[in-house]
Amino acid sequence: MDLKDWRFCSQEDGTISLHDCVMDHVEWEKDGLWLIFGDGFNVTKNNSLNPTGRHRLTGKAAAFLKSGSYLEGAWNRNCTWQASAHSEPIPLQEIPIQREQFAEWSPEVLDFAWEPEKRRLSITAIDGVGYCEINFSCEELWFCWNELPKDAWFQDWPKEVRK
């Protein structure tokens, strides 16, 4: 896969929402890695490559991490369990996420943070195990898609409550 395989490639990370988007798999290539979103991700109306004037959901899409590598990740990071409202929270033990686990792993993304000065991408997500955080390093972060066929789930949100 290559950037030229996509109609649109943007580095405007502040105009991309991965919330509620499923990362289907990771493709490791010599020049970087691809985070594949088979059902797409959301591109806000503020993205310079979105001519619709509306927040839109892409079709199949990907995030490309140029010279990217997996740093580390864990389930239960900064998580606690509380038996009742009156009990003390108990920290949950972190479970490391190994690179090999990406082969058959499809987490639903909650949020991401790109820190270009640190060359670091952090993703928080949920899956069948629970809450997790995964961290990558890369020189550049690109968001790629071919189409904007539908409104994003948050386009008309919050909707007016009708009585």
Image (spheres, grey):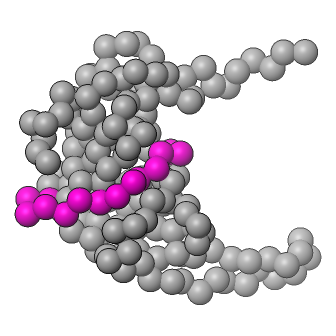
The answer to whether 73 is drawn above or below residue 93 in the figure is above
Residue at screen point 42% across, 78% down: 97
Region of the chain picked out in magenta, as a range: 19-32
> Residue 50's spot in the image, x, y percent?
32, 20
> Residue 96's spot in the image, x, y percent?
44, 83
Magenta stretch holds residue 18: no
| 65 relative to 17 in the view: left or right | left
Splitting the image into 4 quarters, where does residue 83 fall? bottom right
Camera-side residue: 127 or 54?
A: 127
> Residue 77's spot in the image, x, y percent?
54, 75
Camera-side residue: 78 or 162?
A: 162
The answer to whether 46 is drawn above or below residue 100 in the figure is above
| 127 relative to 39 in the view: left or right | right
Magenta stretch holds residue 29: yes
Residue at screen point 55% across, 63% down: 127
Splitting the image into 4 quarters, where does residue 154 fall? top right
> Residue 140's spot in the image, x, y percent?
17, 51
Give the mark count.
0
Residue 17 seen by the camera? yes
Residue at screen point 89% across, 71% down: 85
Residue 116 seen by the camera? no
Q: Quadrant of the C terminus?
A: top right
The answer to whether 140 is drawn above or below residue 17 in the figure is below
Residue at screen point 23% across, 59% down: 27
| 85 relative to 115 in the view: left or right | right
Splitting the image into 4 quarters, where does residue 86 fall? bottom right
Camera-side residue: 113 or 71?
A: 71
